[in-house]
């Protein structure tokens, strides 16, 4: 039995992230009849149907969706959040509210929701679209143990979930997972370009680079060794791997990655501050 059994879940917004989460929930056994999507866009509703989620109840009435829900997932852009939630804030009673909007703190969200406090803030990433996501969660003091389990179950349907105790740490989550798929894509791009320069065609280079990234990540996840130890084990003295690692160390790649993450963290902070004004 799942904690989500018979729980009614309403998504406010039916874009890509909502569709990813819904796909994960349905694949984990949540009945589509228990899911409502409130979105004024006919395009969003058509996309749901195209993904085989046409049995999910689509509506344009957000307030009706909220009144009938146990869990409300806010999946609209942060810039329009205030305008959207103003239409149903007075309908919130005991529902669990989960926000996947970047940059909006629980304090800001609570203000938009007329002081409502049962809020969990989520920072998912795009691999959630293939149920391989990594999500950071933070809950207000109002969140009960049961609601924490519900939020975990909703987001785990699309991948790994980690809770943070301090909301400020959500900026670090953004740096290490929220924005990080782009870092991986950037690294793959560079590997492909390098392999093509060395004589492989682009199709060969892409397949080898992507499979290697996937395999290395899976190996790191399943091994008892830390990544640093795994790296040492495949770096034979005076071998080809050592030559590559020494080149990266000479160019201080590690420092550059840390600095990139710091830039992401700083921008996440500034965006949050901008949203609070």
Image: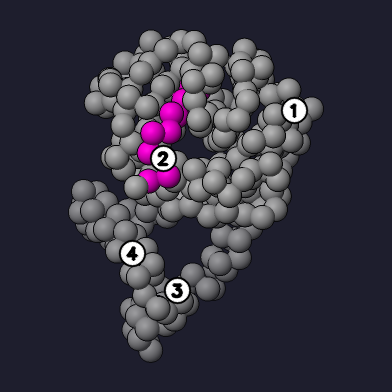
Q: Position of residue 80 (x, y in %)?
A: 61, 19
The residue labelled by disc 1 is 115
Q: For mark 3, does the 10 Å Cα neighbourhood hold few (<14), some (14 to 19), or many (20 or more) residues?
A: some
The residue labelled by disc 4 is 218
Give the CA distance from mark 1 to mark 4: 43 Å
Q: Position of residue 107 (x, y in %)?
A: 74, 35
Q: Position of residue 157 (x, y in %)?
A: 38, 44
Q: Earlier in the sequence, mark 1 or mark 4?
A: 1
Give the CA distance from mark 2 to mark 4: 29 Å
The residue labelled by disc 3 is 227
Asked which secondary structure carries label 2, the reply is loop
Q: How is the image coloured?
A: one colour
The magenta-colored residue range is 2-13
Q: Position of residue 51 (x, y in %)?
A: 27, 27
Q: Residue at x 53, y 20 (%)?
A: 66
Give the CA distance from mark 3 to mark 4: 11 Å
Q: Main secondary structure of the magenta part?
A: loop
Give the CA distance from mark 3 to mark 1: 44 Å
Q: Is residue 164 visible?
A: yes
2 or 3: mark nearer the eye: 2
Looking at the picture, does residue 4 appear above or below residue 111?
below
Left of 167 or right of it: where is 199? Answer: left
- Residue 3 is a magenta residue: yes
1 or 4: mark nearer the eye: 1
- Residue 207 is a magenta residue: no
Query: Which quadrant holds the C terminus?
Result: top right
């Amino acid at each position: 039995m799942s904690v989500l059994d018979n729980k009614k879940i309403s998504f406010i917004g039916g874009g890509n992230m909502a569709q990813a989460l819904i796909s994960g929930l349905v694949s984990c056994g949540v009945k589509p009849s228990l899911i409502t999507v409130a979105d004024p866009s006919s395009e969003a509703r058509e996309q749901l149907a195209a993904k085989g989620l046409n049995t999910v109840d689509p509506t344009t009435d957000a307030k009706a969706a909220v009144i009938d829900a146990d869990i409300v997932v806010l999946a609209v852009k942060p810039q329009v959040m205030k305008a959207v939630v103003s239409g149903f804030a007075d309908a919130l009673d005991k529902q669990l509210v989960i926000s996947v909007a970047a940059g909006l703190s629980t304090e800001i969200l609570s203000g938009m929701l007329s002081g409502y406090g049962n809020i969990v803030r989520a920072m998912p990433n795009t691999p959630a679209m293939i149920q391989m996501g990594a999500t950071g969660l933070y809950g207000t003091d109002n969140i009960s143990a049961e609601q924490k389990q519900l939020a975990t179950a909703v987001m785990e349907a699309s991948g790994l979930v980690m809770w943070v105790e301090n909301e400020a740490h959500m900026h670090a989550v953004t740096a290490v997972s929220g924005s990080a798929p782009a870092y991986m894509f950037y690294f793959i791009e560079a590997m492909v370009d390098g392999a093509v320069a060395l004589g492989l065609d682009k199709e060969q280079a892409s397949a080898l680079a992507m499979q290697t990234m996937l395999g290395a990540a899976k190996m790191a996840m399943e091994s008892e060794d830390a990544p640093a130890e795994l790296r040492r084990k495949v770096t034979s003295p005076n071998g080809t791997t050592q030559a590559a690692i020494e080149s990266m160390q000479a160019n201080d790649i590690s420092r550059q990655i840390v600095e990139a993450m710091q830039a992401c963290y700083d921008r996440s902070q500034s965006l949050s501050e901008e949203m609070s004004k």
